[in-house]
Image (tube, helix red, strand yellow):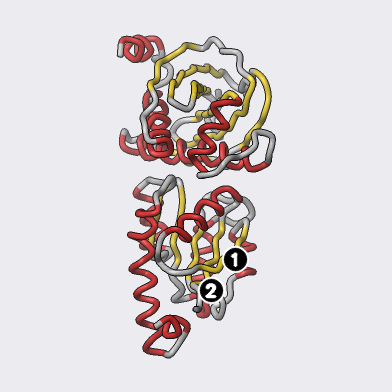
Amino acid sequence: MSKVRALVIDDSQVMRNIVMQCLGRSGMGEFEFTEAGDGEEGLKKFSPANTDIVFVDWNMPVMTGIEFVRRLRANPKGGKVPIVMVTSEKTMGKMEDALDRAHANAYICKPFTVEDLQRSVAPLLKEAEARSAKGGGFFSKLM
Amino acid sequence: MMDRMDGRRECGAFEHWECAAEATAGSFAMICGDEPEWHVEGAAAQSYDGIVAVISIVGDVAWVVMLCLPRDTANAIARRFAGYDIAFDSPDMGDAVGEMVNVIAGDLLARLEAVGVKAEMSLPTVARGTDIEPVQHGRMQTMRIGFASAEGAFDVKLAVTDQLPGREP
């Protein structure tokens, strides 16, 4: 059975563990994780061929999460991969920056529950699956 | 309730301080399930041995928020936060407590925005030790808000300076 390949970017190892544990318990399929400690490392580890979805924190040293999203969206190879911001930033301005201007696909505020993750992530995985099925890509292998 | 009202009267220099108390209580309610009781303790320091996470709030205000967790409280809350036991002396404890103050700061910024105060948060810094106190340039005042929860007692210290970045004191 193929797994959903998730890139999890957060400068906190504990927070990466929480995201991975919640995804593992979410019932949204099996996940295979790649971890990065900041946006720059995330860009290095991102590969359109090996990344199905990205979870990224906002406040990180070296390169912030929002800068990571902008750079990935500016790269044709990273243009369509679903990006979920997982952050403690709760102001409307930050959400608008992430969703409307940087074009992240979803925004989850910390602390979150497995249900919060399911609500945000399940539709993104379905959309990606539908796109992939049309093109005979990764998600068509799950069907 | 009387403590909260008394605190509000005594802490005129700390306009919107209650946003920090409510952000902390709300954040811990989400992490632990129950909202902790809180009351203003004044500026006098309570002796503790534990771990402290510090984050700066800078913009229309210049605040330093310190989350001070005694050892046993830190162990209990970190377990609720991460979903597994974290050894007090491990790097993961610093990680977890840093994330907690990050969550509080995020909630605090949203509450400040709601009352017209714009600010940004820094990255958190975490230290283990005894009776850690903030020291800063400029005139600074400190208030302590005590919390009582099922996971144990803890404090949030709020240090307020009138020396905003780029402005004369």
Please say if A35 is above or below B143: below
Which x, y percent locates residue B162? 51, 23
Which x, y percent locates residue A29? 43, 69
Q: Chain of mark 1?
A: A
Residue A34: which disc? Answer: 1
Q: Are marks 2 and 1 in contact (CB under 8 Å)?
A: yes
Drawn side of residue A49 relative to residue B130, left or right: left
The type of residue carrying mark 1 is Thr
Quarter holding residue B9: top left
Q: Quadrant of the N terminus of chain B?
A: top left
Q: Residues within 10 Å of mark 1 (few under 14, many from 20)?
A: some
- Residue at image point 43% right, 90% down: A136
Q: Nearer the viewer, residue A64 or A12?
A: A12
Per the image, label 2 sits on a secondary structure element best described as: loop
Q: Nearer the viewer, residue B99 or A70?
A: B99
Mark 2 or mark 1: whose residue is earlier in sequence: 1
Drawn side of residue B70 relative to residue B24, left or right: right
Q: Quadrant of the C terminus of chain B?
A: top right
Residue A82: which disc? Answer: none
Residue that label 2 marks: A51
Which x, y percent locates residue A142? 43, 81
Per the image, label 1 sits on a secondary structure element best described as: strand
The type of residue carrying mark 2 is Thr
- Residue at image point 40% right, 16% down: B39
